[in-house]
Image (spheres, grey):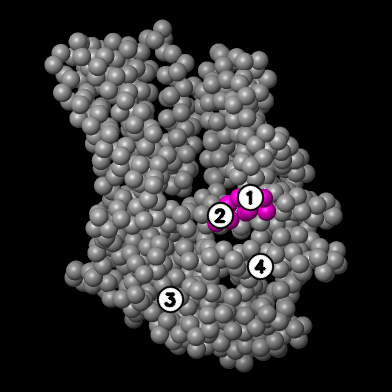
Amino acid sequence: MSSLGAGGIARLREQLARPELPERYALESEIGRGGMGVVWRATDRLLERDVAVKVLAEHLADDGLAERLAREARILARLEHPGVVAVHDAGVSSDGRTWYAMRLVRGRRLDEAAGTEPTLGDTLRLMTRVAETVAYAHEQGIIHRDLKPQNVLLTSITTRGRQSCWFPKVGDFGLSRFVSDPRMTYTGCPLGTPAYMAPEMATGASDAAGPAADIYSVGGILYECLTGRAPFVGQSPSEVLRAVVETEIVPVRRLRPNVPRDLAIICEKCLAKSPDQRYSSAEELVQDLQRFGENLPINARPASFPVRCSRWMRRHPWPIAAAFLMLLSTCGIVGGLIWHQYSLRQERDAALAKYQATRQAVRQMLPVLDDRVFAIPEYTELIRRQQNVALKIVETLNDAEQTAESRVDLARLLLDHGSLLASIGEFSDAESSLRRAVQLVEAVDSGSMTPEVAGVVVAGNVKTAVSLSMQGRNEAAKLILQNVVAIARDASTSKPDSYAALDRAAWTLHNLGNAHLALKEYDQATACYSESIEIRQASLQLPSVSQVEHKNSLGRMAETRVNLAVCLMVQQQDERAAGIYELAISDFKTLLESQPDDVELLKSLATTYLNLSNITVADDPRKAIEQCQQGIEIGTRFVHAMPGDVVVRNDLSMLYGNHALFLRELGDWEPSLKSAQHAIQLTSNAR
């Protein structure tokens, strides 16, 4: 979400006009935009060659950023390496804008080549060269701090007239610094791109980030080359930042089982949360990549299971201890199941009772064993074994009886099993389990098809679809949701007085809207969100709705409104989006009246004010300033309650940043400066 708003974007484009360069350079066309300005294709008339010229944007032409661009040029000039773009010239234009000319790299960015399915050998050669370039920069005392696929340029090299391969060149050293100058920071905000940013940088401690931060980012690029997705994904930069700090990556081989184990180990060592657990130098990473390519044993080894357990228990001692107690308890329950099969019919009730106890133990365990714990394969295997034992027992009962009741019991267990598999990242098996459950239920005669069973089918499919979306597999998620939305709609239509049926239908449509939005199918997303809101409004009017159900429905409706507003903004329907944001704010405020300390509500409300201010500023800067002030008040309450939350600190910093920018546009310099200082202080204190 831009913090400039529609009017600000228009001003930015206007300000990024052609710079007044020396006559030696003839500008031809704009070829890219970066964080500080514009890159132009140009002709060097003196030496008769094509060059790229990077120019500081006019609206950023203050002394600090001008020096930053000049420093980038000096750093590039210092790096004489085939993996770095060479700098030819630098200066200040007649209109006061810093610039530098560099070699024009013909080719494409690594992220633009993502769909070409490179071979494992191509990936290894490419990433070894990137790591070599980073190692060379470190030897020269330079840390990049913003390595990502967009900053790796691929140029085709030829040998004896034949195309050989793509050769990578690392570019955009705008956030780099010298190791000898740890004070070199530019704002209090986290520096870099969230999905590839080391945890120590994601907390805002960019001044403390050393070479290990670059090693982490190289690992992030390698991870995407191997798996087809970034290490962390989310619906917003704030969500990604939270994941970088708090969540473990999905193991490489869980997403791509065909990746060689040693290469996965190399990648995952780079992505360790603690800098001490990564390679001690980029040169060591290069050596391990080379050893892998030569079929030699690599130096990196995975941590042992006890080490991984102790690592997690040190970070979360009470939740993990509780989880182990639950696991041991569940093992006892499942073990007991095996001894109660003397007579299938006589022991049916006893077996199902113990299965229910097993299922309850697993359900209690899930909130404690979050995604970070499921990243440890041994936990995953233990839980899978427990559920498999229960499945075998209930399948045996179903095979013997073949009744509607036994089919429904097996379907319920398969739904639980599928939901659990989705929670631990086993998406393929989860889909298989859920499909089988649906088939079993469809085989049950209509008289035995209870609303509860239909509801579990819907819930299981929605949960699987959400998990797929988190992987970036939005097309697959959409197909699942499209198949199940009819069931949810039918249930809500046939039982319009059932809160549960309306809740499931609205939530299914909400998530289908999310899938459409991710796929840029904006009309379909808008329709799904709108229908979801209509159903929510109907559920709120039910005479039988409880206080808890009313709060739940109002909160989820507000979430849907926010997503609908985002969708409308993308379609440039700002006026309608602003109205939807206002309704969401009203919903959140209503909920806060009875839950004034609910941190999730505070977080959502602050973010909504941030988004709304971006729309309002184009037509009414004063109103946008008021919205920022309201968001700041709410966000400050959250930060006081949860001082360590990186995501909300970032949102609050952006609210202060908007406040400062909008005040500056109106000429209110003193309060603008104070808000800017608050924005910097917020993130610089996030350690």
Q: Hey, what amino acid is under mark 1?
A: Phe
In terms of sequence position, does the residue under pointer 2 or pointer 4 come before the other?
2
Q: Which residue is mark 1?
A: 638
Asked whether the beta carbons under mark 2 and mark 1 sit within 8 Å of each other, the answer is: yes
Residue 653 point in image, percent of width and height = 66, 60
Q: Which mark is residue 211?
A: 3
Q: Hey, what amino acid is under mark 4?
A: Ile
Question: In the picture, residue 2 is in which quadrant?
Answer: bottom right
In terms of sequence position, does the residue under pointer 2 or pointer 3 come before the other?
3
Q: Hey, what amino acid is under mark 3?
A: Pro
Residue 244 point in image, percent of width and height = 47, 57
Q: Which residue is mark 2?
A: 645
In terms of sequence position, does the residue under pointer 4 or pointer 1 come before the other?
1
Residue 41 highlighted magenta (yes or no) = no
| Number of numbered discs on residues | 4
SS category of the residue bearing label 3:
helix
Q: Give the spatial CA distance, label 3 vs label 4.
A: 24 Å
For label 2, the crowd category at 10 Å Cα-Cα, with few meaning under 14, some 14 to 19 and many 20 or more, is some
Q: Give the spatial CA distance, label 2 vs label 4.
A: 16 Å
Residue drawn at 24 percent across, 58 percent down: 304
